[in-house]
Image (tube, rainbow, N blue to C red):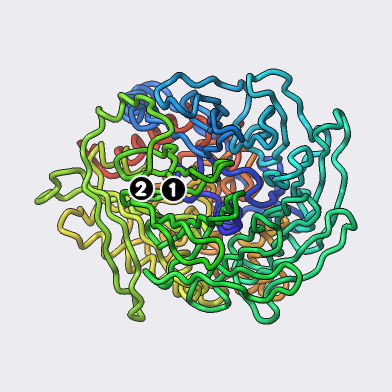
Amino acid sequence: MLRSRLRLLSCALLSLSACGGTTAPGPGPASAGSPAGQAAGPGAAPSAAATASAEPDVPEGDEAARVAEYAHKIEPVVFAFNNTAPALTPDGKKLLFSTSRDGLPQLYVADARKPASPPTRITTPERVVGAQSFDGKTIIFTSDKGADENWSIFKVGLDGSGMTELTPGEKLQRDFPVAGDRKPDQIFYSARNLTSPETTVYAIDLAAAGDAPRKVYTDPVQGNLTDVSPDGKLGLYIRVTSATENTLVVVDLAAGTARPLFPAEGKVAINDARFAADGKRVYVSTDGGGEDSFVLALGIKTGVELARHAEEEPKTAQVDDIEVSRTGKLVAVEVDAGNQKQVRLLDARNLRVKKTLVLPPGTGALGRFSHDGRRVTLTWATADHPPDVYAAATGTGRVSPLRADPRPSLDKLPAIEVSTAQVKSFDGTMVPVNVYLPAGSSGKHLPVIVSYHGGPAGVSKVGWSNGARFFTSIGYAYVEPNVRGSSGYGRKYEMADNGPRRLDAFKDIEATGRWAAAQPWADPQRLVVFGGSYGGYTVLIALTRMPDLWRAGVDLFGVVNMQTFMRSTTGFIREIFKVEFGDMEKDAAFLETISPHRDVAKIADPLFVYAGANDPRVPRTESDQIVRALRERKVPVEYMVKDNEGHSLARRENQIEFYARAARFLELHLGAAPH
């Protein structure tokens, strides 16, 4: 849980299909962006090209007609909607899930026993991600406005009646609530103001209609509440000093006090923590400060290790999420093995592996156990099929679909070929790479998109990707490098880009780009660098530091100036990025050297830029800076801004417009249409 939240808060965009469409609630606090066209935060330096406009472009005439043609080509991809976040009601009869079938992630309820039965939408005007029925009568879910990440908590009946906002008024970034199994009428959640890392735990009594949330505990160090004991008396809170330095504390939810539980000493990463069914022990996913990944069972009072599960294949894999059956018999774990994921069922007593679920190569997310412990839900996606919801029988490990929704547009997509490779970087480090090619590419020289993930501690996994499916369908090769700093390949690899070692990651960018250009299926004269958030920053680094390599770039809400970004981003991100990049004051000189705005005069390649007006993580002012600078120098740049998006492409119509406009832009500047 925490690791996936950290990836989203620090990098935001892992892939346009996953993050843009189904961003998880409360991935980390975010600060409101400065108004467009103003300096990004107090003390921010003015744009180097203050006289140029940062107004968005609007396609017209023949250009708009060509965009419309490309829109028809992307529609089969985005209409193959995502189903995610499955949860069963306590009686196991109803399925709650999030789906983008309406063009925006929404909450649906369906018959859990009939995958082909029509689901019922719980209507809301904004995106909904994540839902749970604690009492079997009502649904608790979270929603924000305009993708601004100020998540509010709602309650609604299973039939869609009686919708109530439980947290009206103050805008906070609220994490998804949790409750004790034996006290489902009281929920707890962590939240923070967008500008501050300080995090507060709140309680809501669901039986007391209209009561305001009650403050329980405040921690000066950013973090989140991951679980509540079955009796509702204790909470587990993970303090996040950095992505690789966390502390698990136990919160007395009545007294409002906290005590550290793990680690006793040293610096470790903690990905998730959950109570055992009896409340007497805690399961913790951690790297222990080293390369291996463990799940530890710790005594709740002493912190003494009672049992351990260690990942073996590969040893650098990390356990992201933990789910515990309320029967006390099983623990389910979601394993991040670099470019793919796995799900295992462990014996809750000794943490020995009972089953590893047989799933096709791909990626997904662990859901929750049914109340009787006989099933565990999950989301899964492959390169050929978008995310969908499933349940695994815990007795046999057999995986069955929870939904059987027709997706006729999938049949319209051409076949693709998927492979992985290892690219040697300057110091011998092997960089993993995913490759998507149109079927039958042998002997062809294709334009190539090299797409860098967000993060920095994100990772590109082999699975469903709107970008890969669309661009391969119109004749591109699509390459996803996992440069140093990516997660899932061990602690050392993830930390290998921190601080001054950021320059080594830049060398990985060049190594993977030149590798892609040298492949037999590649046209080295039509190489495009592509990415969002930290990946957008990567685009700008690539265009400023290795301009000879690329023909064009596509930048989604990328960081342009480290100083203005650090002043205007969320308090949570600002704190953890002190380790990733450096302190705004002490490391100001270094931050300047790694800011693309310093070298903007070196950009000669055309650039397509996208921003969400409500972006709290990388405010629009960052994108405004690069657009102004390039327009001042007459470098071809096209700017797309959406007023109803944040750090996202959550709405289907915006996804269609983005891909269509980006494809038309690349067609214009690569010299010819791929097809």
- Give x and y (percent) for residue 276: 64, 58
Q: CA distance from mark 1 to mark 2?
A: 9 Å
Name of the residue lying farthest toward the left: 443
- Sequence-wise, the earlier of marks 1 and 2 is 1
Q: Residue at x 73, y 45 (%)?
A: 182
User: Measured from the top left, where is residue 452 in percent x and y?
Assistant: 41, 56
Q: Is residue 183 left or right of residue 464?
A: right
Residue drawn at point x = 87 percent, y = 44 percent? 214
Q: What is the three-letter code of the residue carrying label 1?
A: Gly
The quadrant of the rendering that contains the C terminus is: top left
437 in relation to 243, above or below:
above
Is residue 23 visible in the rendered image? The answer is yes
Residue 463, label in figure: 2
Residue 257 sits above or below residue 394 on the image: below
Q: Is residue 420 left or right of residue 650?
A: left
* Rendered image: mark on residue 590: none
Q: Which residue is mark 1?
A: 364
Q: Quick one: SS at disc 2?
A: loop
Disc 2 packing (10 Å; few <14; some 14–19; many ≥20): many
User: Mark 1–mark 2 contact, CB under 8 Å?
Assistant: yes
Residue 601 appears in view? no
Q: Amino acid at mark 2?
A: Gly
Residue plotted at (63% across, 37% down) = 132
Camera-nearest residue between 136 and 404:
136
Q: Residues within 10 Å of mark 1 (few under 14, many from 20)?
A: many
